[in-house]
Each structure stands twice: as structure tokens, then as C-alpha cells.
Amino acid sequence: MCGIVGYVGGQHAAPILVEGLSRLEYRGYDSAGIGVLTSGAPRVVRTVGRVRDLVDALPKRLAGTVGIGHTRWATHGPATTANAHPHRSEDGRIVLVHNGIIDNAAALRERLEAAGVTFASETDTEVLVHLVARSSAVTLEDKVLDAVSQVVGTWAVAVVSADHPDRIVVARNGSPLVLGIGEKEMFVASDVSALVRHTSQVVHLEDGELASVTADGFRTFTAQARDVPKTTETVTMTADELELGGHGTFMHKEMHEQPQTLLRMLGGRLDDRFATARLDGLRIEPRELRQFRRVKILGCGSAYYVGQMGASMIEDLARIPADAEPASEFRYRNPIIEPDTLYVAVSQSGETADTLFAVREIQRKGGRVVGLVNVVGSSIARACDGGVYLHAGPEVAVASTKALTHMGVGFALLALLLGRLHDLSFADGARIVEGLKKLPDQVAAVLAEEKAIAEVAATVAQAPSLFFLGRVRGYPVAREGAQKFKEISYRHAEAYPASELKHGPLALVSPELPTVAIVPDDELLERNVGALHEVSARGGPLLVVTHEGVDLGVACARIDVPKNEPELDPVLLTIPLQLLAYHAALVLGQDIDRPRNLAKSVTVE
Ligand code: AGP
């Protein structure tokens, strides 16, 4: 999704903006641009395509120490140079970038056109720059305030003006925005990854806030022009974490980081003495936690599938009803919010608009919502009433891997804690604690099988379509496996509950349709083996993800993963499916880290 960077200080802005934009590439975009205050009018350069195309289009000399940049993900109007940001006022003296969607753009455009404004793009954003330019206010801060008070929707905006050449004015409502504090210089970005090369000191803006940023500092204020004091936070992310570090792709790097990142995540969170988990960030007292009679998990895409895994862990270990629902559906159906339900929002980026909206809707109706979030200080993390940080480190590849594994472990910790507050015995608690301790090494063992998995991937990569089958605990694993496969290989992949096979999809089974079956060694083994036979008897090629020593009694390719506890096995069973999707995409020559049409962080609905 769209990205914003801004710089004001003593250095040339253009290289800093371009470098910041390249850090935001992972979010997904189709065009890019920068606007720099040079002596005289601001200079704007925009291109369709990659940031490197923008670099090629830049003039040799672009002097100026104040500027803003943007990567655009087309919503209103196709990806063209005219629609790329920054947008300019008619006299070219004001330049603006925007993330989000202006809902009343059509009405505003009509009004502005009637007043004689000629639009240069099809975007919703352009109304903003004309509103700023037409404001009768004197200061840039008041002009921006004037403009945002007329729009409805979501925005993170950054504005520079030739008439106020020492500053950037920014505003936030529903789209993330952060300030980076340097020595006699300041940075602005929609994502801290664009700042970490320059500073670790950041200030997050909240919805409804604006800031005026100069080289010497910043002032934050509300739409009512009331000053708001801010606390500076230190980010732990380093620029090195955003490098490939010898891997060909970020997805490959992130899959291989899992053993270390899991160890880090579990550090200090397992309590051997009481065979439970320590999750202080939840900020809910044990007595209160015990009162919840139900758990409802909300997330989007893969986070929702891991939410389904989490729901079954909670039901298994805590024996309280739990279910997961796509946050994108939940927000549109006037949900019933119950006081004795614990709501859990799960998100890697912490910026997914649908999940954030679901959090706000729950809170508006008086519900209690905690977050399982990876990005520290993100909008969802800050909106929730408490939560568990996933500590997977930055995830750059659009296809999520390590963050999902961490979500699975986060749910296991939550299920263990809830279980031990209910009827999970000490012995069973200790069994799960030991299982969690084993996980990082077991993940490493699966990753060590990469070569063999790559060979299997080559055999299924050419199939036009794949089935992924799983039952009960295996079903979310199958869903996530299919999701990963289609995201990066662009092959059709469909997940089905194994129990549903006879109710329709069996008609599709043929020698041309490989089935990837998830067969954990649990109480449902026999039933799952039965499903394999049904597929095999109809000539369907089988790839089975299972555990060592499991007798499948059917001809198939197989990937064995180490056995853990039945409640934790789903987490391990997803690891080979990451590698399977990765190597199929590699064989097919796809752009693994930036799959077409997808964005890392879906900040619009
Ligand atoms: C995962 O590979 C996908 N890119 C996608 O489904 C993702 O999980 C979803 O958009 C939710 O993102 P979030 O975890 O940042 O909220």
C-alpha cells in the first residue's frame, strides 16, 4: 500500500527520500514520486514503476533540503504518472502526498471545479492539495487544518509549500504516520522502516493529530488547534534487519530466521514452576481473565487462518469456546459484542485497516480486545487494550512466514495461560511448555530438509491447480498452505476440509490435480488416511505432510516433520508448506518478495 517519507534538515533531501521510498517498496506500489523545495517553485518528479525508475528519472542536480516522497498503490485512477504523488496546487507552490482514501472526493471535486479549479489527475488525493491552496488561512498549519476539516475518509498527509520553506506539515486520520527525530534534522514516514537508517527516536501521531516539523523540532496539535505533548519512543529495529544478509530473497531469509526469532519470542514467557505462560502485556489480571466465557479471534488473510489454529488451541487447552472470523467480514455485519468474550486481534503489520476497524468497533460497543501484533507501536497494537508482541522482527516479503509462525506460538501461549486458569492440569501444562521449548529446534530440522522439499515443489509447480486437504487441526494448516502457494506461485490452490471431500470436490480429483494432504499423527489419523485412499483410488497424485513413522498405506510423496504435542503440531506442519510455495514460485520464475497485485500492509479496506 502507499508509503510516505519526508525530510527537513541540512542535507540534500532527494537521496534521503529515495532511500526511504526504497525501504517502503515491500509494502507494494505501482508508481513513485518526490517533491523537493528548491529555490523558487517546488520540483516534482514522478514515475510509474519501481523506485529505481524514479531514480533514473531524477535530474542530475536536485538541490533542496526539504521534501516529501510517496509510493502509490492505485485506488482512484490507474497507475499513471499524472496520478502518482506528490500532487501540486495549480500555481505549483504547494506539494502534497497522501495515504488513505477520501470518501467525499467526488463532491469536493465538483465543488472545486465549479470554483474554477482544473484537475490534473483522477485521484481522490488531488482535492486535498487544492483545498490547502484555496484556504484563506495564513500559516501552512492552519491551511492544512482547514483542508482536512473538509474531508471525510482516511489520511496520512504530508505537505510542503514554497511560501513556508522551512517545514513539513503532516496530518493523520486512520493511516499511520511517524516522526523521526535527528540532530538538526527531522524525518516523516508512514512506516518506521523508512527512518531506521537515520534515527531510532520516533514519535507516533494518533488519529486526528497534526504536526508541524522543522529541522529544529516539531509541534503536534489537534484539529481544534490544541497542542498535544508527545513522548519519544526508541525503536529497536536496525537497518541491518532490513538487508538480505546473503539470501536471494527476503522470504527465504525470513523463513530461515524462524528458529532464532522463536527462541527470542519464547524467552521469559514460559513459566516452568507453574507450567504456564507469562504474558504481562495482556494487562488483564488472572481473576478477570478467568471470567471470559468465550474467545473471538479477528484477523485477515493468513492471520485469520492462524487465528483458526489459535481457536482450536484455546478450545483444546482451555476448554472454552473459541472461534476466528475474518476481520474484513466482521466489521460489516453489525457484530454482537458480548462482555464475557475476550476479543483478540491478530496482525503482523498492525496496520491492516479491516482489523483496526474491527478493534474500534468492538471497543465502541464496550468489548475488551487484546492484540497479537508483530510491529511494535503500530496502530492496532496501540489501539488494543493490551496484548502480546510477536517479536518476529521486521518482515519484508509480502508473503508472511515467520510472523505467522510467531502468531501460532502466540496463540499457544495464550491458550496455555487460559488453560492453566481453567482446568488444564499441571502435567498437561508442563507438556505444552516442553513442546514449546522444542519448537525452535524442530523448525530448524524442517528447514534443513529444504533441498528435498524443493525437489517435490518442482514436481507440483507445473500443475494448473492444487488441492490442500486437512481435517480439524489440519484444516487451517491446509488453508494457509494453499494461500501461500497461490500468493507467490500464481497457481490456483484450494483448501478443503478432508471431511468434505465426498460432498463435492472429489469430482475434481484426477491424475492432473495433485493433492497436498496434512496428516498429523493424532486421534484423527485413521480418518485422514481414509481420505488419502479416496484420492489415490481416483488416480490423484498425493503429497502428504505428516510425521516420521506414520504408516499411510498409500503410494505418495511425503514430507515428514518432527512430532511435537498434538496441539502444537499445526505450527510445525506449516513450515514445509512455506518452503513448498517458495520453491514452486522459484521454479516458475515469479517475483517472490513482491507478488503482483498484493501489498504487505493493507491499509485501505
Ligand atoms: C500473508 O502471506 C498475506 N500477505 C496476507 O494474507 C496477510 O496475512 C493479511 O493481509 C493480514 O496482514 P496483517 O497480518 O499485517 O494484518
Image (tube, rainbow, N blue to C red):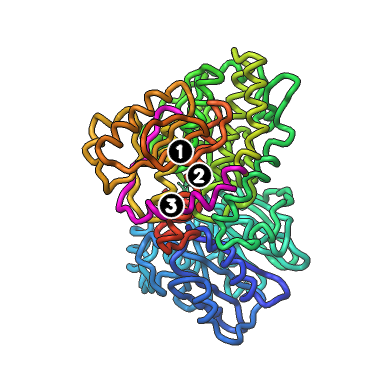
Q: Residue at 60%, 83% (x, y): give it.
A: 62
Q: Residue at 44%, 48% (x, y): give it.
A: 484
Q: Residue at 40%, 44% (x, y): give it.
A: 482
Which residue is at the far left? 507
Mark 1: give few (<14), some (14-19) or many (20+) Cα within 10 Å.
many
Whole-Å distance between the Cαs marked 1 and 2? 8 Å
The amino acid on which the numbered mark 3 sits, given as a three-letter code, is Ala
Task: Establish whether ligand 1 lies closer than 8 Å to the Cβ of label 1.
Answer: no
Vertical arrangement, residue 382 with respect to residue 114, above or below:
above
Q: Earlier in the sequence, mark 2 or mark 3?
A: 3
Pointer 3 residue: 457
Residue 457 in the figure: left or right of residue 242: left
The boundaries of the magenta stretch are 445-473
Mark 2: give few (<14), some (14-19) or many (20+) Cα within 10 Å.
many
SS under mark 2:
helix
Whole-Å distance between the Cαs marked 1 and 3? 13 Å
SS under mark 1:
strand
Name the residue nearer the viewer: 197 or 246: 246
Residue 188: tell me if it is visible.
Answer: no
Residue 514 coordinates in the image, percent (x, y):
33, 45
Q: Are marks 1 and 2 in contact (CB under 8 Å)?
A: yes
Q: Which mark is residue 545?
A: 1
Residue 283 coordinates in the image, percent (x, y):
67, 28
Q: Earlier in the sequence, mark 1 or mark 2?
A: 1
Q: Earlier in the sequence, mark 1 or mark 3?
A: 3
Mark 3: give few (<14), some (14-19) or many (20+) Cα within 10 Å.
many
Q: Residue at 29%, 36% (x, y): give it.
A: 535
The amino acid on which the numbered mark 2 sits, given as a three-letter code, is Pro
Name the residue nearer the viewer: 582 or 128: 582
Q: Which mark is residue 576?
A: 2
Residue 235 coordinates in the image, percent (x, y):
71, 52
